[in-house]
Amino acid sequence: MSSKKNILNNSIANILQKGVRILEQLLLVPFFITAWGAAYYGEWLTLTIIPSVLAFSDLGFGSAAANSFVLKYASGDKQGAANISKTGFSIISYAVVLGVLLSVGVMLLGSYFGWFDKSLIPASDAIKVLPFMIAARLIGFYSQLFCANYVAARRAALGINLGTVGSALHLAAGAVVLWFGGNIVVYALWQFIVSIGFNVFYWINSLHILGLYREIKGKYDKTIAKDIFSKGFGYLMSPVWQTILFQGTTFVVRLTLGPVAVAVFNTVRTLTRSVNQIYSVVNGSIRPELQYEMGAGNLPKAQKIFIYSIRTTFVLSLLGFVFLALFGLPLYNWWTHKALIPPQAMWYVFLSGILVNALWWTAGTVFGALNKPYQLAVSGVISAVIAIFFSYLCAKIWGLTGAAIGSFIFEVLMMIYILPASCRLMGVKIFDLFNVKK
């Protein structure tokens, strides 16, 4: 199948995936409130913080192993790929065991210190629910490694679509349980059952799709394990810089301008960054093909995918910029019922960030595709810290517009580093990105 057709199929699959995730976030809320009440639902959300935090015990090992596997398989080294799969599976299993031990420790501490005693959810129910919730999350650690089989088989769209089916099953199970008045124990149990059943199917199907296990038996390799550990921490730094940037700027605005300013700042940022969601569809569509072609040594084809993906992203960002420049503020006023009034200068600073972001965000896909996470992660952390510093200084002088300037500085710094660095990795010149005749 051609790369163009694969990218088109990946695009459709990513759009469907986005749709189901939006439904996950929005559709179940009225079911929760109707079945349990707003206060009880709030307690449930608080309880889910624990498995969400434990999810970091994956430490990026899934991403590191999956990317190494695809690159090695595409290069023709099937034995090396099989060894990575075996080693990666073992390391992720250790991470799962670590997650289990941490979860047991959290529950024991919670029971000892009475963390659940003041909750609307009875402590006995909370202790029953947490193992199911945590286990369902831990099982998901394997998903990226399983998905790598689909990418290596040039069937990435199938892997994405099956993942979407899994999300839909979780959504349907939750809706049915809530519709029939099930309590939190029943809800968590069914989420666990769906997670177990789907991930086992996803794993077995991915093995059959690629068929590597029929040819070669993988072996645990200590050198590969060290490489996965090393790169895994690089992938872990990605949510770190995002947390520093988004939570840090929010804290700065609260510190310098007050709580109302926080509401204005975050809602404007959320609306203007809605355009960035389109980029994630582009990235998810081109990355499997870019990674495979690079692994296979087809540099000219990979360069073409890289160049056209950045051009596509920039055109989409320009369209988003124009749309929000014309209709964004009226849409914002309708969305917030005119309760929040952002400065116009602040609005256009955030809009300008869309165009700059488009020039580096998709280019940054190269680092993950080539399994080089540290360049993107370290630059992200450094740029985020600098952006927070300038957000504080500028907010003291220009208020909300100044805080937005700090975020804009982050985008500029990332563009200055990421765009040239990704072009060097791909062997193209920055000028080639804008030379439409090329």
Image: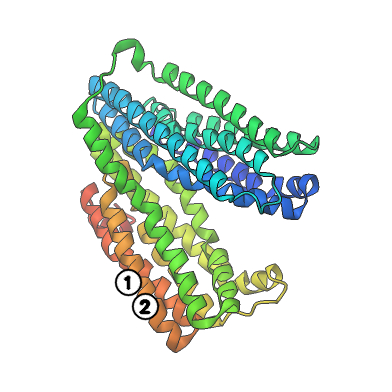
Residue at x 36% of width, y 31% of height: 94
The residues tagged by marks 1 and 2 sit, at their Cα atoms, a distance apart of: 6 Å
CB under 8 Å between callouts 1 and 2?
yes
Residue 350 as seen in the image, left or right of residue 224: right
Q: Quadrant of the N terminus?
A: top left
Crowd rating for badge 2 (residues with CA inside 10 Å; few <14, some 14–19, many 20+): many
Instruction: Pinpoint residue 201: horizontal percent, then vertical percent.
Output: 53, 21
Element under disc 2: helix
**Looking at the picture, which amino acid does disc 1 mark?**
Ile
**Looking at the picture, which amino acid does disc 2 mark?**
Phe
Residue at x 75% of width, y 54% of height: 38
Residue most extreme to the bottom: 397
Toward the viewer: 40 or 10?
A: 40
Looking at the rendered structure, the number of numbered marks drawn on it comes to: 2
Instruction: Pinpoint residue 304: horizontal percent, then vertical percent.
Output: 31, 45
Numbered circle sitting on residue 386: 1
User: Residue 132's image quarter?
Assistant: top right
Element under disc 1: helix
Q: Is residue 359 above or below residue 85?
A: below
Residue 165 as seen in the image, left or right of residue 374: right
Residue 342 as seen in the image, left or right of residue 226: right
Residue 274 as seen in the image, left or right of residue 438: right
Instruction: Pinpoint residue 62: horizontal percent, then vertical percent.
Output: 37, 36
Q: Is residue 297 visible?
A: no
User: Residue 337's image quarter?
Assistant: bottom right
Q: Which residue is mark 2?
A: 390
Q: Is residue 304 above or below residue 92?
A: below
Residue most extreme to the front: 112
Crowd rating for badge 1 (residues with CA inside 10 Å; few <14, some 14–19, many 20+): some
